Image: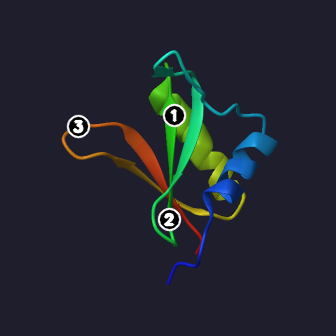
Amino acid sequence: MARHIRAVAVDAVLARNGYEPSEFVDGDWGPGYRTAQDGRRQVNVFHDGPGEQDGIERYRLELQAAGYHVIPDQQPGGGRRRLHVTKP
């Protein structure tokens, strides 16, 4: 069963490894990663800007190396790619 996880912890792993968070500027998201809490046991990670697929893959590898359980996913209806991140 997955354990409690916080988006801030996932954010810290990515920031510590040199990735830049995206910023909401002038009505749009700038390039980088974004984390979103999804309940007590899951965090979703998105890549904003160009290179979505490559960004998601890099984040997946970093988070798995940090000991997280990571499942690539895509929002329903062909939406955005994202990662479901949990603690094993």
Q: Residue at x 60, y 43 (%)?
A: 59
Which quadrant of the figure contains the C terminus? bottom right
Between marks 2 and 3, how big is the CA–CA gap? 21 Å
* Amino acid, disc 3: Gly
Taking depth in this image into account, of 72 and 32 the one nearest to the observer is: 32
The outermost residue toward the bottom is 1
Q: Position of residue 70 (x, y in %)?
A: 52, 58
Label 1 CA crowd tier, 10 Å (few <14, some 14–19, many 20+): many
Asked if the residue under mark 2 is in contact with the one under mark 1, i.e. CB atoms within 8 Å, the reply is no
Q: For the residues marked 3 and 1, what is the alpha-carbon distance in whole angstroms?
A: 15 Å
The tag earlier along the polypeptide, 3 or 1, is: 1
Looking at this view, name the residue that lies furthest to the top. 26
The residue at which mark 3 appears reads as: 78
Amino acid of disc 2: Gln
Q: Amino acid at mark 1?
A: His
Tell me which residue sits at (78%, 34%) in the image. Answer: 18
Q: Residues within 10 Å of mark 2 (few under 14, many from 20)?
A: many
Q: Look at the numbered disc 3 and give the secondary structure of its residue.
A: loop
Tell me which numbered mark, 1 or 2, is placed earlier along the sequence: 2
Q: Of the residues under marks 2 and 3, which one precedes in the sequence?
A: 2
**Which residue is nearer to you in this view: 49 or 25?**
25
The residue where tag 1 is placed is: 47
Is residue 44 rendered to the left or right of residue 4?
A: left
Q: Position of residue 61 (x, y in %)?
A: 62, 47
Secondary structure under the numbered disc 1 in the rendered image: strand
